[in-house]
Amino acid sequence: MSDPDLRIGTFRYDTTQPLLDGETKPQGFTAEFSSAATIPEIFGRMLRDREYDVSELGWTFYLRTLELDEPPFLALPIFPNHVFRHSAIFVNVDSGIDEPGDLAGKTIGEFGTYGQDSGVWAKGLLSDEYGYSPGQSRWVIGGLNAPMKPFDFTDLLHPAGVDVTEAQADKSLSELLETGEIDALISANTPQCFLDDSPRVRRLFPDSEPLARDYYRRTGIFPMMHLVVIRRDVVARNPELTRAVYECFLDAKNAAMAKYENARRTFQVQTMPPFVFELFEKNRRLFGDDWYPYGVAKNRNAIEAFHRYHYEQGLSTRHLSIEDVFAPDLLDT
């Protein structure tokens, strides 16, 4: 294989830190790895400016590019960010929302765009598990903890029958939730009003962990927020890069997992929070040895669920298959 120089952008997680710190080296090519202060910055740099050859990207933002006449990217089944989204739904205590069905008829905020990854997962979960439909609510898009226009690096898609508006120019979603100007909020990050222990805000599911664990036992789904994409023009010049990039991210993730496994010997004392050892052992019993899987096979249920949600929520014009989305030579992973 030739020895191309690749610019690779990803957020700093324990799954990617070995690459960003140079502890894990890609095999067969040289790469400059970089990050940013926030994850949307990485997305914007890739979608607007094609600043990277390879980049972490929000799953929904990638799927939206497949609607273009000439889609610019190809997805690799690398998932550096998994989060259960039962905990992503916040409500104002005076909204009258006590259970998921109460979201119908309410006004709900969402960060950045209608249907960012955490929103797609949360709405899909509410639909599958509780019979809720996003079209039953009104939606307000804005900045989470500071006023912000919707993301300018992606098409602002939503079904024609869903009421979606922008937040006031001088208000954040956190402020609107605390004052009751919106009834609920779906957010990838925690709103400041909740971090400040506002008595006016709580989670829809206050004790979400047992629900998430039961959800995983029943479905096998550990929701992935993002994937990794490579520019198609780069693949055209070096087709072997798709597997090489996949392997380098996989090596980094496995190196991070090995550190946690090795720390079992010392009761995870390298990590500050109490009871991490007990949590780690509990998680191994539920998720098994490969508790953060990459590739298609171990994530098939989750991939197919996300594609279905994306279509049902009006963000794709057709129900995409796994073969539509991922690099053909990585379908065996």
Image (cartoon, rainbow, N blue to C red):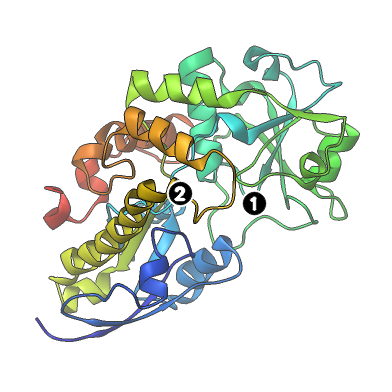
- Front residue of this view, candidates 140 and 212: 212
Residue 257 point in image, percent of width and height: 33, 52
Which quadrant of the figure has residue 242?
bottom left
Secondary structure found at label 2: loop
Q: Which amino acid type is shown beneath numbered disc 1?
A: Gly
Q: Which residue is mark 2?
A: 268
Mark 2 / mark 1, whichever is N-terminal: 1
Residue 212 visible to the viewer? yes
Quarter of the image containing the N terminus?
A: bottom left
Asked if residue 251 is positioned above or below residue 205 in the image, the reply reads: below
Residue 27 point in image, percent of width and height: 18, 76
At x 17%, y 79%, the residue is 237
At x 26%, y 69%, the residue is 232
Mark 2–mark 1 distance (CA, rounded to whole Å): 36 Å
Q: Which amino acid type is shown beneath numbered disc 2?
A: Gln
Q: Residues within 10 Å of mark 2 (few under 14, many from 20)?
A: many
Residue 109 point in image, percent of width and height: 71, 38
Q: Which residue is mark 1?
A: 112
Q: Residue furthest right?
A: 179
